[in-house]
Image: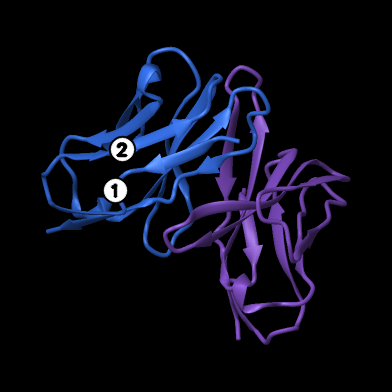
Chain colours: A blue, B purple
Amino acid sequence: AQSVSQHNHHVILSEAASLELGCNYSYGGTVNLFWYVQYPGQHLQLLLKYFSGDPLVKGIKGFEAEFIKSKFSFNLRKPSVQWSDTAEYFCAVTPSINDYKLSFGAGTTVTVRA
Amino acid sequence: NAGVTQTPKFRILKIGQSMTLQCTQDMNHNYMYWYRQDPGMGLKLIYYSVGAGITDKGEVPNGYNVSRSTTEDFPLRLELAAPSQTSVYFCASSYSTGTSGHEQFFGPGTRLTVL
């Protein structure tokens, strides 16, 4: 079974600062990778996903993530955060075969101060 | 198109009571899932279904049961509620586009407290 590690439990930033959230997974085969966001009081929404092709993936709201296969990583980035980016962020992984069973990381709470 | 809907939004149960969490999707997705979310633990898969009449256990199935009699509905049953089942429960659904894999769509969640 695969596991997913998110390095930061809680990140506090000021507006306009850059954000990078780490995500590593342990699985030897081909994977599909996701970042989900959960705004306060809301359900999970997909930020971006990687299935194949260009390892630099662009998502909604100015987020991007880079898949580095050799490092088993899929880090999320945003050059300049806004107060509205305050949320919890989850990395999730599924093997490309039987690719419907997601494994989630523990999540990173991001607080952006105005 | 409502997506994935869940009822109730909140519920308080006493130890030993039973209840059913409802989940419905109107996107004609074959795959449906139940997760629980606990602080600092991410989401854990309880049960999933790959189509009507087919269900299987996830990572943390103990204390729960599911059924899938239709494509749209995937209720989660707690028979004897325990304090350890205090959590936020999310239902999700997905479809496979073949080459593009699965993308899961989540409901708004049910916050359950067992006292």
Task: Tell me the residue at 45%/45% (across/down).
Answer: A105
Rendered residue at 37%/56% (across/down): A39
> In terms of secondary structure, where does tag 2 sit?
loop
Q: Mark 1 points at which residue?
A: A8
**A67 left or right of B71?**
left
Residue B55 visible at all? yes
Q: Would you place residue A2 above or below residue B6 in this image?
A: above
User: Residue B32, image x and y in percent?
Assistant: 70, 45
> Is residue B90 shown left or right of residue A112?
right
At label 1, the amino acid type is Asn
**Element marked by disc 1:** loop
> Decide: marks 2, 1 in contact (CB < 8 A)?
yes
Judging depth in this view, the residue of B112 and A73 nearest the camera is: A73
Query: At x 59% / y 27%, what residue is drawn?
Result: A95
**Which residue position holds label 2?**
A22
Image check: A85 left or right of B51? left
Above or below: residue B110 compared with residue A61:
below
The location of residue B29, given as percent across then percent down, is 71, 39
Image quarter of the C terminus of chain B: bottom right
Q: Which callout, 2 or 1, points at the residue further toward the start of the chain?
A: 1
Residue A72: mark = none
Q: Which chain carries label 1?
A: A
